[in-house]
Image (cartoon, rainbow, N blue to C red):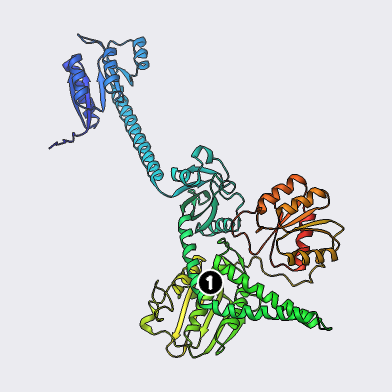
């Protein structure tokens, strides 16, 4: 077992062959109040042995000794104890030799004839040692802290007040792909957000300026352009005068977690969709039946206006239902945008009226001027769907279901009554039923995953847990009020943005008219080609049609300058739309392209150099406005 004995005071090694001078130095040091322990040596061997065996705080040396001189002792000290101060205290050292000793690393030299300077030189040398020791400790602490920061799994980034990066740890390099030399000095927004929507970024900066801190999710991009999601904690660092000095960001890569959440939400949406699919199928058949019947009557009946109106209304209704199913099951885009909850509530009212049992009446109450919120439309629609399906199941013998949306302003005192709530502006949406209600012993479990009061095969217990997680991820909160036998009300609150509110409802602009421009329509559905040709020719365009890519290429080869713009279906048979577009571009590099499809690309990029997209089935108005927009764009 090793025992370490802590030596008291300052350890001084004195290289001196004169006993009187040794005693003089020791008494002078102690007389000045310096707590020291002096060890005297006379020979080179003893000097080297002491330096190897012990660590000293100070070396004091005579210059002239019987066996060797002070410069030789200085050389030994610089080799064996390079950081220890070395002071000459001699009566024989000359000025030239003293200067040479300083060049070789001596700390100071004192003439024995003026010994009073020795105490000052010793104090100054020991102070320098302490300062250097403190500097080494500080540097070591900084190195250790930097190592800790580099060991962290989170990206740690520091920016100045102009958002220029001044610190970038190794985890930031691992997550984003840029090393510190690439990132430092770059603008944070330009580097990490590139072409991403900047609304969440502006919200972060505004919150940091007012509250010194912000926590939330941000979409960002890596060096390769790969989109990622991060959980960001931004903290404003102030100087001693309270002025902003820098911004600290701690970012956690949650891309994989978000992907898993989206997969879970999609599976839960499919569960909800299963409860409604039979009603949707029945209603879709009812919507399409007038089209089939009306088409037959149209050939024989003189008065066609009412029949045409019925056909158009039914077709729109069927197309809307197909889009609802597609958007709900696919999940659409997971980015948060400005959402009008009024539209979602009204759409939910249509679903209830079309698919819920007829013994359940419903009422939609929407306050005028409901504020928008920042959110993922499909996820918010999922919350409404889950709550309404639960309300339906709570009323097996029928009842009343009410959905209400209104603006709410919470002050600090009111917000304190609700967990997870903060003071501010909210949009409140409630779903209330007159069903069986929830017992007090069940109330504490309803948001637990897989807890359900429904019978086997009638529910997984994921609807409410999913709904409350979606609401929380949108910065909101949910409250429940229920009485057994009287009904239940679920009310969720989402932070209002007041950005992107609806306009004043000005009269729509007239439909744009063509001026003889050529349009090439490519679609494998003959009826689409017929309708598009008729509509476009009626509004001043020249039209060519093709049913596939090869036919379109042949058509454009024969009349290279006859088409200014092409409308191409994204789901062409045989030859893909991307290959068709590349071939058409080779024939006419100036050809403008509009892609058409049943649903948005859902985060997938459109083929290269596509100027527009139109969702099918499209109206004449949408078709004309899309063509006009692309043709007039630079």
In this rendering, position of residue 210 left or right of residue 1: right
In this figure, what is the number of numbered marks?
1
Q: Residue at x 72, y 52 (%)?
A: 550
Q: Locate residue 424: give its quadrant.
A: bottom right
Q: Residue at x 17, y 17 (%)?
A: 46
The residue nearer to you, when weighing 350 against 119, is 350
Q: Locate residue 288: give its quadrant.
A: bottom right
- Going by the picture, which residue comes out furthest to the left? 1
Residue 577, image x and y in percent?
67, 54
The residue nearer to you, when weighing 272 against 489, is 272
Residue 294, image x and y in percent?
74, 80
Above or below, 175 against 421 in this view is above
Decide if residue 81 is in sight here.
Answer: yes
The residue nearer to you, when weighing 550 against 418, is 550
- The quadrant in which the N terminus is found is top left
Q: Residue at x 19, y 34 (%)?
A: 8
Q: Residues within 10 Å of mark 1 (few under 14, many from 20)?
A: many
Q: Residue at x 77, y 50 (%)?
A: 554
Residue 464, image x and y in percent?
45, 74
In this rendering, position of residue 293 left or right of residue 60: right
- Find numbered disc 1 in the image and state the secondary structure of the residue it sits on: helix
The residue pinned by badge 1 equals 382
């Amino acid at each position: 077992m090793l025992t370490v004995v802590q030596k008291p005071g300052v350890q001084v090694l004195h290289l001196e062959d004169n006993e009187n001078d040794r005693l003089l130095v020791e008494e002078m040091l102690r007389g000045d109040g310096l707590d020291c322990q002096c060890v005297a040596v006379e020979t080179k061997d003893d000097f080297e042995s002491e330096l190897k065996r012990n660590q000293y705080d100070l070396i004091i040396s005579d210059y002239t000794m019987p066996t060797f001189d002070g410069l030789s002792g200085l050389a030994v000290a610089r080799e064996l104890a390079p950081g220890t101060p070395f002071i000459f205290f001699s009566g024989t050292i000359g000025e030239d030799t003293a200067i040479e000793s300083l060049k070789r690393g001596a700390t100071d030299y004192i003439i024995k004839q003026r010994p009073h300077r020795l105490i000052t030189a010793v104090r100054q040398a020991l102070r320098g040692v302490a300062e250097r020791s403190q500097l080494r400790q500080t540097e070591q602490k900084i190195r250790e802290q930097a190592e800790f920061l580099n060991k962290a799994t989170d990206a740690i980034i520091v920016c100045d007040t102009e958002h220029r990066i001044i610190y970038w740890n190794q985890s930031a390099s691992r997550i984003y792909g840029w090393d510190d030399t690439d990132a430092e000095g770059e603008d944070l927004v330009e580097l990490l957000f590139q072409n991403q929507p900047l609304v969440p970024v502006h919200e972060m900066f505004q919150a940091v300026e007012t509250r010194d801190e912000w926590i939330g999710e941000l979409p960002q991009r890596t060096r390769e352009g790969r989109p990622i999601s991060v959980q960001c904690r931004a903290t404003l660092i102030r100087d001693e005068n309270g002025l902003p000095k820098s911004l600290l960001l701690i970012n956690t890569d949650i891309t994989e977690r978000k992907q898993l959440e989206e997969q879970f939400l999609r599976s839960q949406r499919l569960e909800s969709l299963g409860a409604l699919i039979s009603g949707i199928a029945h209603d879709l058949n009812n919507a399409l039946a007038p089209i089939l019947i009306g088409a037959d009557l149209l050939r024989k009946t003189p008065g066609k206006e009412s029949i045409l109106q019925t056909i158009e209304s039914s077709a729109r209704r069927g197309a809307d239902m197909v889009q609802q199913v597609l958007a709900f099951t696919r999940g659409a885009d997971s980015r948060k945008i400005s959402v009008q909850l009024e539209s979602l509530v009204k759409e939910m009212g249509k679903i209830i009226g079309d698919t819920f049992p007829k013994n359940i009446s419903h009422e939609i109450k929407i306050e005028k001027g409901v504020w928008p919120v920042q959110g993922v439309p499909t996820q918010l629609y999922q919350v409404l769907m889950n709550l309404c399906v639960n309300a339906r199941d709570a009323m097996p013998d029928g009842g009343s279901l009410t959905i209400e949306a209104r603006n709410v302003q919470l002050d600090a005192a009111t917000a304190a009554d609700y967990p997870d709530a903060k003071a501010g502006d909210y949009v409140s949406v409630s779903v209330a039923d007159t069903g069986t209600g929830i017992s007090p012993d069940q109330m504490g479990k309803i948001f637990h995953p897989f807890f359900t009061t429904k019978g086997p095969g009638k529910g997984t217990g994921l609807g409410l847990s999913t709904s409350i997680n979606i609401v929380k991820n949108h910065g909101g909160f949910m409250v429940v009020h229920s009485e057994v036998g009287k009904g239940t009300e679920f009310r969720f609150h989402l932070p209002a943005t007041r950005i992107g509110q609806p306009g004043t409802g000005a009269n729509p602009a007239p439909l744009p008219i063509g001026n003889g421009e050529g349009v090439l329509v490519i679609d494998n559905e003959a009826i689409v080609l017929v309708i598009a040709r008729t509509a476009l020719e009626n509004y001043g365009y020249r039209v060519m049609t093709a049913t596939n890519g090869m036919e379109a290429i042949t058509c454009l080869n024969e009349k290279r300058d006859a088409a200014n713009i092409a409308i191409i279906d994204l789901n062409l048979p045989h030859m893909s739309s991307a290959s068709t577009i590349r071939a058409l571009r080779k024939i006419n590099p100036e050809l403008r392209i509009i892609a058409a499809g049943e649903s948005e690309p859902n985060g997938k990029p459109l083929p290269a150099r596509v100027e527009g997209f139109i969702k099918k089935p499209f109206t004449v108005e949408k078709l004309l406005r899309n063509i006009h927009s692309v043709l007039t764009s630079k």
